[in-house]
């Protein structure tokens, strides 16, 4: 009883003022958290698209080492010491989920147990395992919802579960808990909130980068490849020597009339739906792009002229059978004219497109809703 009263007395003396040593330890823990965030952000933005397993290993390792490092920067209140090892594990659970958290929890628990001492087992159970398990249970509601209130509520639940050790195991634990909890609570929750803000800001930045990258390569209205990216993809296909190669030009019939009758908003909606239909036909041998206005360009490889004609005929029939909708959800049907030709040298792409374009307008002059090609005669001879 004398020992527990002495512990309580020492804690109260220590909590009466902030020593330089405590401030240094708090700053050290903040620095560790900041470094963890920087490293995780670098891994996420630089490595995640390339090697999922290696990225997973790095993420687990970074958080585990941060949590272990915090074991070496405990804050002392008289004869009682506590650390914030549960905080990186909680953040890992909230941000990346249980699959990342479990191996990190095991590693940190083993390191804490290896320190030995009377508090080894309680330290592993109350200081590491229980708060981390609580964080994993709360992770779906705490962070995935992008709701700061739920996130901070989850953080409070984690620190309270960690402090069960003080209340249950330490003599006069409730009194000790009341004395040291304000500092623990302030640091734990404020640090969690700081990381939350940095993570959310980083996510916004990555989302913006991805959007900029997408629109650098795609048409903003239809989502199809823009001309620059389309021709880059064509060159990639050509390098693979997966010929023969063809270019087809596709144009929506009477599209100007649609714009004049229903307005440009409806026209844009129909263009987007039309592009999605073409995109649904794309694949290994077929690349689709928006050439301009209501005109689209298709690159086809690895097929015979008959196979290309059949593929384009299937697309034309698909267009004719599909119901499109205006901005006011008024149904309508469309037709399209298509012209295509082949090529043997990607350097002559402008000439190839010009020939395919001439065939497209030949299809329009002949009544629209049909396919025209300078290869038709060759196809008819073979058939």
Image: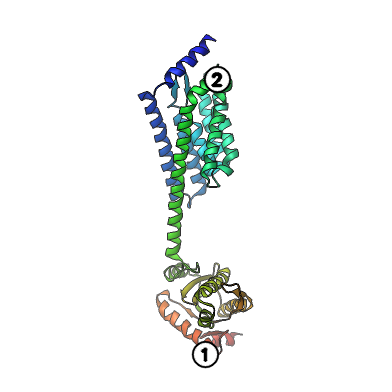
Task: Give the numbered dot on residue 150.
Answer: none
Find residue 30 and report its horizontal and vertical position in percent. 41, 34
Horizontal side of residue 29 vs 100, given as left or right: left
* Mark 2 nearby-residue class (10 Å; few <14, some 14–19, many ≥20): some
Vertical placement of residue 61 versus 290, above or below? above
Residue sitting nearer the eye, 234 or 11: 11
Task: Give the numbered dot on residue 173.
Answer: 2
Q: Name the residue under label 1.
A: 365
Horizontal side of residue 351 vs 223, given as left or right: left
Vertical placement of residue 247 versus 51, above or below? below
Find residue 243 and report its horizontal and vertical position in percent. 50, 73
* Element class at badge 2: helix
Residue placed furthest toward the bottom: 366
Residue placed furthest toward the right: 321
Q: Please name the residue shown 57% across and 20% down the image.
A: 169
Find residue 324 and report its horizontal and vertical position in percent. 60, 74
Residue sitting nearer the eye, 375 or 231: 231
* Element class at badge 1: helix
Q: Disc 1 versus disc 2: distance between alpha carbons? A: 91 Å
Q: Which dot, 1 or 2, sits closer to the camera?
A: 2
Location of the C terminus (image quadrant):
bottom right
Find residue 156 and report its horizontal and vertical position in percent. 53, 34
Q: Is residue 101 visible?
A: yes
Vertical placement of residue 331 versus 284, above or below? below
* Mark 1 nearby-residue class (10 Å; few <14, some 14–19, many ≥20): few
Count of marks overlaid on the render: 2
Q: Is residue 67 visible?
A: no
Location of the N terminus (image quadrant):
top right
Earlier in the chain: of badge 1 and badge 2, it is 2
Q: Please name the residue shown 58% across and 71% down the image.
A: 277
Residue sitting nearer the eye, 113 or 149: 149
């Amino acid at each position: 009883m004398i020992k527990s009263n002495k512990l309580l007395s020492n804690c109260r003396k220590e909590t009466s003022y902030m020593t330089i040593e405590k401030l240094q330890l708090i700053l050290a823990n903040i620095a560790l958290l900041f470094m963890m965030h920087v490293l995780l952000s670098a891994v996420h933005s630089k490595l995640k698209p390339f090697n999922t397993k290696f990225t997973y290993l790095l993420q687990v390792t970074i958080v585990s080492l941060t949590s272990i490092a915090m074991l070496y920067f405990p804050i002392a209140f008289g004869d009682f010491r506590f650390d914030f090892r549960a905080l990186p594990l909680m953040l890992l659970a909230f941000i990346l989920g249980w699959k990342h958290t479990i191996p990190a929890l095991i590693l940190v628990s083993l390191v804490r147990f290896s320190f030995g001492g009377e508090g080894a087992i309680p330290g592993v159970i109350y200081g590491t395992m229980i708060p981390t398990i609580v964080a994993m249970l709360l992770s779906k509601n705490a962070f995935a919802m992008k709701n700061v209130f739920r996130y901070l509520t989850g953080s409070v639940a984690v620190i309270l579960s960690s402090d069960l050790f003080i209340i249950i195991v330490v003599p006069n634990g409730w009194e000790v808990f009341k004395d040291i909890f304000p500092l623990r609570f302030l640091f734990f929750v404020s640090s969690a909130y700081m990381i939350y803000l940095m993570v959310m800001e980083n996510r916004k930045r990555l989302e913006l980068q991805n959007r900029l990258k997408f629109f650098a390569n795609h048409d903003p209205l239809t989502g199809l490849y823009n001309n620059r990216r389309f021709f880059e993809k064509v060159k990639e296909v050509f390098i693979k020597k997966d010929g023969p190669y063809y270019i087809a030009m596709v144009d929506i019939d009477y599209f100007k009339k649609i714009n004049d009758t229903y307005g440009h908003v409806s026209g844009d909606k129909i263009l987007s739906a039309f592009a999605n239909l073409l995109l649904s036909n794309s694949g290994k041998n077929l690349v689709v792009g928006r050439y301009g206005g209501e005109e689209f360009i298709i690159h086809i490889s690895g097929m015979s002229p008959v196979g290309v004609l059949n593929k384009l005929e299937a697309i034309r029939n698909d267009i004719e059978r599909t119901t499109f909708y205006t901005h006011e959800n008024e149904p309508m049907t469309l037709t399209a004219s298509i012209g295509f030709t082949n090529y043997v040298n990607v350097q002559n792409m402008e000439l190839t497109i010009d020939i395919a374009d001439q065939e497209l307008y030949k299809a329009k002059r002949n009544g629209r809703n049909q396919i025209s090609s300078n290869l038709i005669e060759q196809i008819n001879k073979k058939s």
